[in-house]
Amino acid sequence: MNNFSYTRASNISEAIQKVSADADTKFVAGGTNLIDLWKYNLTNFNALVDINSIQDHHNIEEKADGGVRLGAFAKNAQTAYHPIIEERYPLLSRAILAGASGQIRNMATNGGNLLQRTRCYYFYDPAVPCNKREPGSGCSAIKGYNRIMAIFGTSENCIAVFPSDMCIALAALDAVVNVSGPGGERSLPFADFHRLPGDTPHLDNNLNPDEIITSIDLPEKGFSKNYSYLKLRDRNSYAFALVSVATAFELEGDKIKDARIALGGVAHKPWRVKQAEEFLQNNTASRENFVAAADIIVKDAVAYEYNSFKIELTKRAIIRNCMMALNPETQLPGAQPSA
Amino acid sequence: MPGVTEVSLQINGQSHQLKLQPWVTLLDALRENADLTGTKKGCDHGQCGACTVLCDGDRILSCLTLAVMKDGSEITTIEGIAKDGELHPLQKAFIEHDAFQCGYCTPGQICSAIGMLNENKAKSRDEVKELMSGNLCRCGANTNIIDAIMEVKEGGNHE
Ligand SMILES: Cc1cc2nc3c(=O)[nH]c(=O)nc-3n(C[C@H](O)[C@H](O)[C@H](O)COP(=O)(O)OP(=O)(O)OC[C@H]3O[C@@H](n4cnc5c(N)ncnc54)[C@H](O)[C@@H]3O)c2cc1C
Ligand code: SF4
Ligand code: FES
Ligand code: FES
């Protein structure tokens, strides 16, 4: 835990200018991840730039193209309970409310949620090697107690999972992340925002250190009729996902016109398998087809010593969540399945 | 002290001018600088809810908040919820329902419950349980805590 100075930025360009001037300056939004990591001595900075006083990007707004823009500095609770989100993007609302606690959702921002770091136990333990914390030092999880680790897209350098719930829904909804940096503005499709570990496990995403997330755009299609978020974890509430599934269907009769299945807790980023979604498209919304889609998804899964149970768990979670998406009322609060 | 800044907080209706370093959390500022030790430090990492206070009406965790970030805000702690010597309805309900044993989690539970009732999102007992899940009770008084909250919720007598 080091000492640091603190300033507030009142607009985006001031914020960018402050972080790009000094590599040891970081943004703080809700602080729920940054302050925690700082207390564990897992992150260091000489200066914090508070971005909460920036005037713009605190709201949820409908856009001219029919979509909705989520301000990066809007709180997770404000987003989940916003009437537009509850009505048009209930999958997102459900996923946010399945994460963290009431207090944390009141503090956590939409931008910060995308940048939260893994909850890998070894990452949190400075006494052991971890390539994400210290590149080149080794991965303690691969041969360690890897029960919570990834089964998709891992590398020999890191098998950690990305812990967000909100982002799993954003991935399913094909959201777009808008960022600003010294070179101007750019937009990243959600699928390109987070990274797989590869041989750069210390990098969680494709945001540059001097860029700031300003907003997240949702396309017009919100799948408000047939959606479900299922979160399986070691205790009923207030725990990170072992496996989570965001499912959204557009149905015509019993035919699936569009299908989205995104998984959480199983990879270094929200996980989608195009082939399974394409299989469901123009197919019947039946349990049999959901089983087939789940088989397509898990066929590439690779387990480690203690997390092989996750493969079967993922498969069952997908099937169950597809069934629940046909009748979203079957979900209990906290994204639990019906009894 | 290096890097001290003046932080002005309205705590329980009283204004406090505190000289704090930027890395002092709101929790430590309340306990160490404002001498309000009702707010408890449990995990200090956002995991137990013991440090819950109301900030401009919203329940937040004071252990993951830097006090400087809340300069100019209105903070309510457990010390500030009784009115004119009369206990808050939740305080009374906690006593009636045996909703605490050691009492360590109680200030955070009560502040969190006030915030949750003001949010007005929980309709059922299940929803109250879910929305109170950020507050852990090591003594296992949870069932009685939910009973106490439900009584106040149904009575509609919270502020
Ligand atoms: C006990 C606990 C349980 C939790 N459980 C869950 C859970 O079940 N599911 C879940 O999804 N999450 C969970 N969370 C994580 C929580 O959702 C995140 O910590 C939160 O969303 C981060 O947002 P923040 O605004 O607090 O970010 P901060 O902590 O302020 O920032 C996080 C990082 O992002 C950077 N940053 C923030 N905003 C921006 C921006 N706009 N542009 C560029 N950089 C930025 C900061 O510099 C920092 O590096 C939990 C957290 C805790 C403490
Ligand atoms: S899985 Fe990744 S985060 Fe965990 S110890 Fe290995 S390198 Fe570190
Ligand atoms: S002390 Fe803040 S949540 Fe535990
Ligand atoms: S009463 Fe002891 S921790 Fe809750």
Image (cartoon, coloured by chain):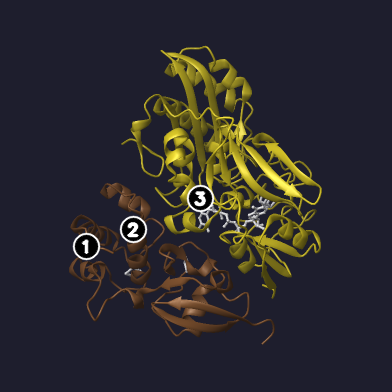
The residue carrying pointer 2 sits among few (fewer than 14), some (14 to 19) or many (20 or more) residues within 10 Å by Cα, namely: some
Q: Nearer the viewer, residue A103 or A71?
A: A71
Element under disc 2: helix
Q: Which residue is mark 1?
A: B157
Q: Which residue is mark 2?
A: B118
Residue type, label 3: Asn
Residue type, label 1: Asn
Q: Quadrant of residue A84?
A: top left
x then y, percent, for residue B92: 21, 71
Q: State how far apart marks 1 and 3 are (Cα).
A: 28 Å
Which chain letter goes with mark 3?
A: A
Q: State how far apart marks 1 and 2 are (Cα).
A: 11 Å
Residue A229 visible in the picture: no
Q: Is mark 3 within 8 Å of ligand 1?
A: yes
For chain B, the rendered hue is brown
Residue type, label 2: Asn
The residue located at (58%, 39%) in the rendering is A266
x then y, percent, for residue A29: 60, 59
Q: In the current view of this chain or complex, which residue is farthest to the front?
A: A64
Quarter holding the N terminus of chain B is bottom right
Q: Nearer the viewer, residue A264 or A259?
A: A259
The residue carrying pointer 1 sits among few (fewer than 14), some (14 to 19) or many (20 or more) residues within 10 Å by Cα, namely: few
Quarter holding the C terminus of chain B is bottom left
| Residue B79 vertical position relative to residue B149 in the rendered view, above or below | below
Q: Are marks 2 and 3 on the same chain?
A: no
